[in-house]
Each structure stands twice: as C-alpha cells, then as structure tokens.
Image (cartoon, rainbow, N blue to C red):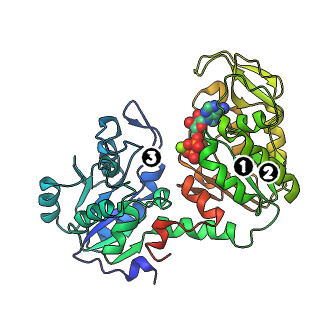
C-alpha cells in the first residue's frame, strides 16, 4: 500500500497542493501538461469519497494580487479535463474561503486563488508562514502534496502545512521521485546532463554539484553566454551575468580536472534584437558581433550535442537551447529534443519551459523516458539536496 492509499480520505476534506504553474500567453494556457499530471491523484481522492481544496501558485506575484497571474483559467481547464465542476474562489483566505470550505460536499472541488498572492506563502519568516499554514489547515482534515515543481521551496503550503495535518505524497510526486532516484543512485553510464534556459544564477549550484556526478555536460541557451564570456569571448548584447564570470571560470577548470566532457557551442544564431521577426545570422561562437545577441545554438553545435547525447545511457535535460518561442530560434532545442528521443537508456526532460518546448514541437510525452514537471525541483534533487516539500511528506 502506498503512503497515499494509507491516508484516510473517505468523507474527509483534503488540501491538495498541486503544481499549476503553467505557461500562459494572453490569458490562454499554452501547455496544460502540469494540470494533466495532477489528474490521477485528484481522481483517486474523489473516488475515495474526499472533497478537495486545491492550492497552487502561478508565477512570482511576490505577495501582491496580480490579475494576470490568477488561477481562474486553470479552474476552467481543470473542469474541462475532469469533466466535473471546479469551484474557483478568488481568494486564498478569509470569510468566503471558510464558508465555501465548510459547505464542500464529498466529491466536490474548490480551487483557491494563487497562493503567492499572500506574502506569507513565500515568507522567510517562519512564524508568518506558520500562521498562514494554520489558516489553511483549519479548512481541512488532511493534506496531499502533489506539486512536484514546488517541492524545493520552503513555502507555507509546501513545507509548513503538511506538518500540521495527516499527510501523504500524491501519485505525481511519488512517480517523480522514483524516476529521479534512478538518476541519482548509480545511473547507467555514460551519464550526461544538458542544460540551457535563461538564468545561470538559478543553475550555477547545480552545475557545481553535478561536476562530481556526470560524465558529460552540454550547455546551451541563454546561460551559455556567461560561459563564453568566461572564456574571454565577445558576447555582444546576449544575456550575460557578469558577476558570475569568475565562478564560471572555476567551473570550467573543475570540469577539466574531474574529466567531465564539457560541450559548449561553437556556433551561435544571433539577431540584432529579442523579437520573433528579428533577422537571424549564424556566426562562430568567438565572433559574436558587439551589437547582436545570441538567441540559439547553431547547427554545428546542435549536431555536436546530439552526437554527445547519443553516446549516453542516462541523460537529463533541463532548459531550452534557444528562444524556442520564436520559430527562427527553435532549431537547437529541436535537434537536442530529437537526440533525447533516441537515447537507449533513460532520458528525462525536466522543466516547465522545456516540457512546453518539446510538446509545442510535436513530440509526444512517450518519446521520452520521462517528462518531469519540475525544473528547479528536479535539478536540486539530482544535486543531492534535501527538498523541504519532500521531507515534510516523509520522503
Ligand atoms: P525551464 O522552465 O525548462 O526550467 P528556464 O525557465 O530556465 O527553463 O528557461 C526557459 C527560457 O529560456 C525560455 O523562455 C527561452 O526563451 C529562454 N532562453 C533560451 N535561450 C535563450 C537565449 N539565448 N537568450 C534569452 N533567453 C533564452
Ligand atoms: Mg521556466
């Protein structure tokens, strides 16, 4: 019996923490993968006679009510996917929430507004978080944690709340942990990690820790320009984190010492501005014009990354290789995705934008070994860090 199945739910009000941090464009959900991933647990709980109060976050509203980050579109999509009514309450606490919670009947679902509209959700002050968690705990009898994408956060609904209630992990969190465990405990080698995406600062710790674990590291995306700058190359107006150049230099040196096969792009697709219609030009990685920015890795680099991936038995990929949202800068991401589909061992894609990218390019989830709903969470797990949202659930 799983931890979830051991939790008493019949006739109970259950707080379900989900990850509904989906990409939105002009109020329309562009990838509902994270909502779909929550369905098995929701169905299990409803079938078992529970009523659900679902809590989740969207984006980083920093404690303010930001209408463009409302979960209202998620309520609508969730209702469509379940073919059941989902009542949405446009608040995270207060009279309306309490009244609706009290009248909730077995089989019914109430979705709260974006929990991060309350500053207490993400507060560093334990007491402030604790008080908010207590308010949420007062609404329910039990807690199920299934928001994998947020388990690396010490937030009220992720870390403090489960400790106040009988709790269990949901099916998604359990499945995610099972897959990532395979990558951390004796992965079949060669083990390669491919990283891209926008921010080096988010991923620098990960790279440092992975240098002791992986055989191969390939880096693309916006974060690569800090690496190129660290090698003394001109990066034009590309995304670059100047204050991290020294750290990146050390990482490059450590990769060499550890015998990690580090792949950096040798050609770059540049453009004069960050726009879908900006004219794209291919240049060598050491010849980026001062007035241009790198928006994708070039074909020689993607071919090199693909060949490197083909030698691996275990591959984890997080972060698009370029600005895949603009078709002219999506090719690198597509080639890397394609290479992952051919890996003979385990291939895992992690991250909201990375998952959205492969789906928007027409790949099926089944083309990969596993698509993790968590980017940061998956990376921190692979680093071997203790994740607050997993510890709180006894995992
Ligand atoms: P994930 O959500 O998969 O963890 P990130 O959030 O770290 O990935 O990064 C995704 C974003 O990185 C995408 O929106 C993409 O447009 C952006 N990106 C990729 N390459 C570049 C680049 N060269 N310059 C600017 N942004 C980039
Ligand atoms: Mg992202």
Residue 32's tag is 3
Distance CA(mark 1)–CA(mark 2): 8 Å
140 up-or-down from 342: above or below = below
Picture coordinates of residue 242, whole percent (x, y) = 67, 34
Q: Is residue 354 visible?
A: no
Mark 1 vs ligand 1: CB below 8 Å: no
Quadrant for residue 49, please give it. Answer: bottom left
Q: Is residue 102 left or right of residue 67?
A: left
Is 182 above or below relative to 310? below
Kindly indicate whether the residue at mark 3 contacts the one at mark 2 (C-beta within 8 angstroms): no
Element carrying mark 3: loop
- Does the image show residue 124? yes
Dot 2: what SS?
Answer: helix
Residue 194 is tagged as: 1
* Residue at numbered disc 2: 309
- Return the x and y of residue 270 as percentages of the image width and height: 71, 22
For the residues labelled 3 and 1, the Cα–Cα distance comes to 24 Å
Rendered location of residue 183, percent (x, y)? 68, 66
Question: In the image, what residue occupies the spot 45% across and 46% down?
Answer: 32
The quadrant holding residue 263 is top right
Sort mark 2 into few (<14), some (14-19) or many (20+) by Cα contacts within 10 Å: many
Percent coordinates x, y for residue 316 in the rendering: 69, 55
Crowding around mark 1 (Cα neighbors within 10 Å: few <14, some 14 to 19, many 20+) is many
In this figure, what is the number of numbered marks?
3
């Amino acid at each position: 019996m799983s931890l979830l199945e051991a939790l008493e739910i019949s006739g109970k009000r259950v707080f379900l923490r989900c990850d509904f941090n989906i990409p939105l464009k002009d109020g329309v959900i562009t990838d509902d993968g994270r909502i779909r991933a929550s369905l098995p647990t929701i169905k299990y709980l409803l079938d078992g006679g529970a009523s659900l109060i679902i809590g989740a976050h969207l984006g980083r509203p920093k404690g303010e009510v930001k209408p463009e980050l409302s979960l209202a579109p998620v309520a609508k999509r969730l209702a469509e996917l379940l073919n059941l009514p989902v009542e949405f309450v446009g608040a995270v606490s207060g009279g309306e929430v309490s009244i609706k919670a009290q009248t909730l009947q077995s089989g019914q679902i109430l979705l709260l507004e974006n929990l991060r509209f309350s500053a207490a959700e993400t507060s560093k002050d334990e007491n402030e978080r604790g008080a908010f968690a207590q308010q949420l705990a007062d609404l329910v009898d039990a807690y199920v944690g299934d928001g994998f994408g947020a388990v690396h956060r010490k937030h009220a609904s992720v870390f403090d709340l489960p400790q106040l209630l009988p709790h269990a992990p949901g099916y998604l969190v359990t499945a995610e942990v099972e897959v990532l465990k395979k990558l951390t405990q004796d992965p079949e080698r060669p083990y390669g990690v491919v990283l891209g995406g926008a921010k080096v600062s988010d991923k620098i710790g990960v790279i440092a820790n992975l240098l002791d674990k992986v055989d191969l590291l390939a880096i693309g995306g916006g974060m690569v320009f800090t690496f190129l700058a660290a090698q003394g190359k001109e990066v034009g107006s590309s995304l670059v984190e100047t204050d991290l150049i020294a750290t990146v230099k050390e990482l490059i040196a450590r990769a060499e010492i550890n015998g990690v096969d580090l792949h950096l792009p040798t050609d770059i697709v540049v453009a004069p501005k960050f726009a879908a219609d900006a004219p794209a030009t291919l240049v060598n990685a050491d010849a980026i014009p001062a007035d241009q920015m790198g928006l994708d890795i070039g074909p020689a680099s993607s071919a090199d990354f693909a060949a490197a991936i083909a030698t691996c038995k275990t591959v984890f990929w997080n972060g698009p290789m370029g600005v895949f949202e603009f078709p002219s800068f999506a090719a690198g991401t597509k080639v890397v995705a394609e290479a992952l589909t051919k890996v003979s061992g385990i291939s895992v894609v992690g991250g909201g934008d990375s998952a959205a990218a492969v789906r928007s390019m027409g790949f099926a989830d089944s083309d990969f070994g596993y698509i993790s709903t968590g980017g940061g969470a998956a990376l921190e797990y692979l680093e071997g860090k203790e994740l607050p949202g997993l510890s709180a659930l006894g995992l």
